[in-house]
Image: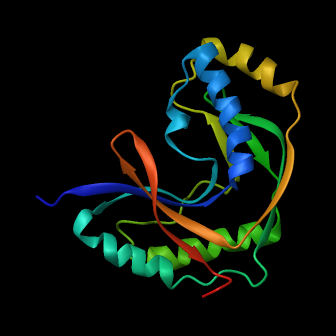
Amino acid sequence: MPEHQLYYIAILCPDQIDRMVLDHKLWLKEQFGCAHALKSPAHLTLVPPFRLEESREEELIQLLRTFTGPTGGLTITLNGFGHFSKKVLYIHVEETPALHEIKKQADIHFEALAGHVIKPDIRPFHPHITLATRDLSPHDFDRAWAHVSDLSFDETFWSGTMSLLRLSPGRWQVIAEKNWQTG
């Protein structure tokens, strides 16, 4: 049976913002034991995690390299915090037509790898940067939410790059990037 790896495709936050997000993730780990979100750099998911035979990784990287995104890149604005039920805490990403367009283009482009492997996400696109997920108990949620909801987080960055990440033992690693501004 072929070996499978887990991958996802995202827009990564620049290092300075990644460090700011990491501070929040570390606080959540210290207070509530939330460590799952620490496995990934700060990012906006474009194509959610999927399994692919390891032997097809180069095919996936080549597909990434043929992606063409919107001219001029994207301005991404982060403003405040939010949550999905009592399971996920995140930094809110301002929704823009350009961000929705890149998500749509990514869905179409990467579905070409094989519809049975990468399928468009049926959930509505709600761009966010995860702070805690999976390991935040409903019991701890109220205290965690009370803390972050009193804070502000207002940052803006420009991106013309998407990244392919693979789950290596215990941590997501960037294995390829595509700057669609330089071809």
Task: Out of 113 and 151, give the one closest to the viewer.
Answer: 151
Q: Is residue 62 above or below residue 154?
A: below
User: Please, which colouring scheme is shown?
Assistant: rainbow
Q: Is residue 153 above or below residue 178?
A: above
Q: Is residue 18 left or right of residue 119?
A: right
- Which of the 4 quarters of the picture holds residue 160? bottom right
Q: Is residue 47 left or right of residue 13?
A: left
Residue at 51% across, 25% down: 135
Q: Is residue 154 left or right of residue 103?
A: right
The reply to whether residue 114 is visible in this rendering is no
Task: Out of 164 and 51, give the one closest to the viewer.
Answer: 164
Residue at 63% across, 52% down: 43
Q: Quadrant of the C terminus?
A: bottom right
**Residue 76 position within the rendered picture, expressed as x and y whole percent measured from the top left:** 80, 60
Q: Is residue 72 above or below residue 164?
A: below
**Residue 144 position within the rendered picture, expressed as x and y whole percent measured from the top left:** 71, 19
The reply to whether residue 51 is visible in this rendering is yes
**Residue 163 position within the rendered picture, expressed as x and y whole percent measured from the top left:** 54, 65
**Number of numbered labels in the structure image:** 0
**Residue 1 position within the rendered picture, expressed as x and y whole percent measured from the top left:** 10, 58
Residue at 57% across, 18% down: 137
Residue at 65% across, 36% down: 22
- Which of the 4 quarters of the picture holds residue 132? top right
- Which of the 4 quarters of the picture holds residue 28? top right
Kindly give the residue lying farthest to the left in the view shown.
1
